[in-house]
Amino acid sequence: MRKRIVAGNWKMNLTLEEGQKLTSEITNMVNDELNEEITVVINPPFPHMQAVKKLIDGSKNIFLGAQNCSDKASGAFTGEVSATILASFGASYVIIGHSERREYFNETNEQLTEKVKLALSNNLTPIFCCGEPLEIREAGTHEAYVTEQLTKALFGFSAEEMQRLVLAYEPIWAIGTGRTASSDQAQEMHAAIRNHFAAKYGDSLAAGLSILYGGSCKPDNAQDLFSKPDVDGGLIGGASLKSRDFVDIIKSF
Ligand code: PGA
């Protein structure tokens, strides 16, 4: 069975003290309440990583992730953080290609490919994001748009590399807007994404890919979303900043 994953993306929120409090609460609740095998990933801002790692150590379900990594291996790139540095902090996952990075920092498919390469070579699992803006959804061309994003950034990877990725479908019109994709809209796109990878890499690789949904996922809609056959978990923004909400989402399978 493929991995079920719930990843929290704190974005640029929380002071160190707030982040430590949130992590302690999540860790205690997950250790006390979670009986199923669900992978939980916490993706804090870079400076919090060491403190978060310390607090989750010893919890078998919870892993450390980052929100981004550089497309360069090392060197004179002021302000950047490499995949090697993230790995040295004990990170296991890294979000790559979030729509906010694509939109506000002009990240290109070529750069995203480089980031995935560097993440993999440092044994980090990329959580690779895709998703369409509202006007594309309204024009009805969302499937073609998303599969093209994936083809351009990822189809150069070998099957051995590709099976180490996690994907996240995040319709941009649903991120932070309170407007969630319906579970049927999510299922339709997740199935299309899986078929797209099956056509290139074969059914068995595609069947093993975890595809997460992101975009205003909350405790009151997570169960419906996660009940769909091709939705393997969630990438959670706003609701990952509240321990009770985040853990309730984790328990929604
Ligand atoms: P949201 O963000 O849950 O606040 O909509 C999701 C994301 O951007 O990963």
Image (cartoon, rainbow, N blue to C red):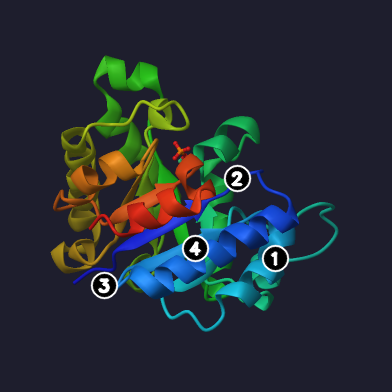
Question: In this rendering, does residue 65 appear at all?
Answer: no
What residue is shown at x 21% (from left), y 61% (from top)?
206
In percent of width and height, residue 10 lies at: 57, 48
Which dot marks residue 36? Answer: 3
Going from the N terminus, do you reach mark 1 or mark 3 first? Answer: 3
Q: Which residue is mark 1?
A: 73
Q: Amino acid at mark 3?
A: Glu
- Sequence-wise, the earlier of marks 2 and 3 is 2
Depth check: give the residue in front, 31 or 66: 31
Marks 2/4 in contact by CB < 8 Å: the verdict is no
Instruction: Tell me which numbered mark, 1 or 2, is placed earlier along the sequence.
Output: 2
Of circles 4 and 3, the one toward us is 4
Amino acid tagged 4:
Ile
How far apart marks 1 and 4 lie (CA) works out to 33 Å
The front one of 115 and 137 is 137
Q: Locate residue 190 relative to residue 93 in the image: left or right.
A: left
Regarding mark 4 in the picture, which secondary structure is present there?
helix
- Residue at the (38%, 20%) spot, across then down: 134
**Between tags 2 and 4, which lies in front?**
4
Sequence-earlier tag: 4 or 3: 4
Disc assigned to residue 26 = 4
The alpha-carbon separation of the residues under discs 1 and 2 comes to 23 Å
What whole-number distance in Å separates the C-alpha atoms at marks 1 and 3?
37 Å
The residue type indicated by label 1 comes to: Ala
Between 30 and 78, which is closer to the camera in this rendering?
Answer: 30
Q: Position of residue 251 (x, y in %)?
A: 30, 59
Q: Which residue is mark 2?
A: 11
Q: Please report whichever mark, 1 or 4, sits nearer to the chain's N-terminal start.
A: 4
Q: Is residue 159 visible?
A: yes
Quadrant of the frame with the N terminus: bottom left
Identify whether 171 is placed above or below 92.
Answer: above
